[in-house]
Image (spheres, rainbow, N blue to C red):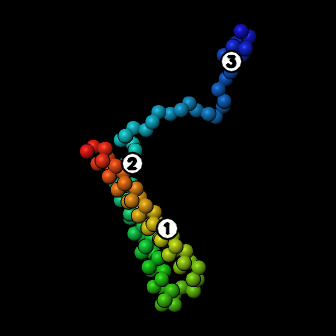
Amino acid sequence: MENINKINDLQPLKGLSPQKAAPNKADAPKFDDMLKGFLKDVNQMQNTADESIQKMVAGEVKDVHQVMLAVQEAKIAFNMMLEIRNKTMEAYNELIRMRG
């Protein structure tokens, strides 16, 4: 019985707050807005990579490393965009199968 009283005397750790409620749906970003933003970012990376290549060919850029970085960054972002599209289509097809 003495141990139970010790548990009741425990104080919460300082600096830790209790769990917060889940955010409202109104506060959460919409999927289509997130997707549009990501597509815009990927497009910007592709344009930056293209500009870097054109500047390198024109002799304006001496640092090939920076050009290759921009190209690889654009490639990775594009591949991620394709994977998001593939997963979204898989999820959509699964919903259609479940419905029918």
> Is disc 3 placed on a helix, strand or loop?
helix
Q: CA–CA distance between discs 1 and 3? A: 52 Å
What quarter of the picture does the N terminus occupy? Answer: top right
User: x, y percentage for residue 50?
Assistant: 44, 79
What residue does disc 1 label?
Answer: 76
Q: Residue at x 62, y 33 (%)?
A: 16
Looking at the rendered image, the disc whose residue lies closer to the viewer, 2 or 3, is 3
Whether residues under marks 1 and 3 lie with C-beta atoms below 8 angstroms apart, the answer is no
For residue 28, above or below residue 43 = above
Q: Which residue is drawn at 35% across and 41% down?
A: 26
First reached walking from the N terminus: tag 2 or tag 3: 3
For residue 44, above or below residue 5 = below
What residue does disc 3 label?
Answer: 7
33 or 97: nearer the viewer? 97
Mark number, residue 29: 2
First reached walking from the N terminus: tag 1 or tag 2: 2
Looking at the rendered image, the disc whose residue lies closer to the viewer, 1 or 3, is 1
Q: Which residue is drawn at 47% across and 33% down?
A: 21
Q: Which residue lies furthest to the right in this view?
A: 2
Amino acid type of the residue tagged 2 in the rendering: Pro
- The residue carrying pointer 2 sits among few (fewer than 14), some (14 to 19) or many (20 or more) residues within 10 Å by Cα, namely few
Q: CA–CA distance between discs 2 and 3? A: 42 Å
Amino acid type of the residue tagged 1 in the rendering: Ile
User: x, y percentage for residue 77?
Assistant: 46, 66
User: x, y percentage for residue 55?
Assistant: 48, 85
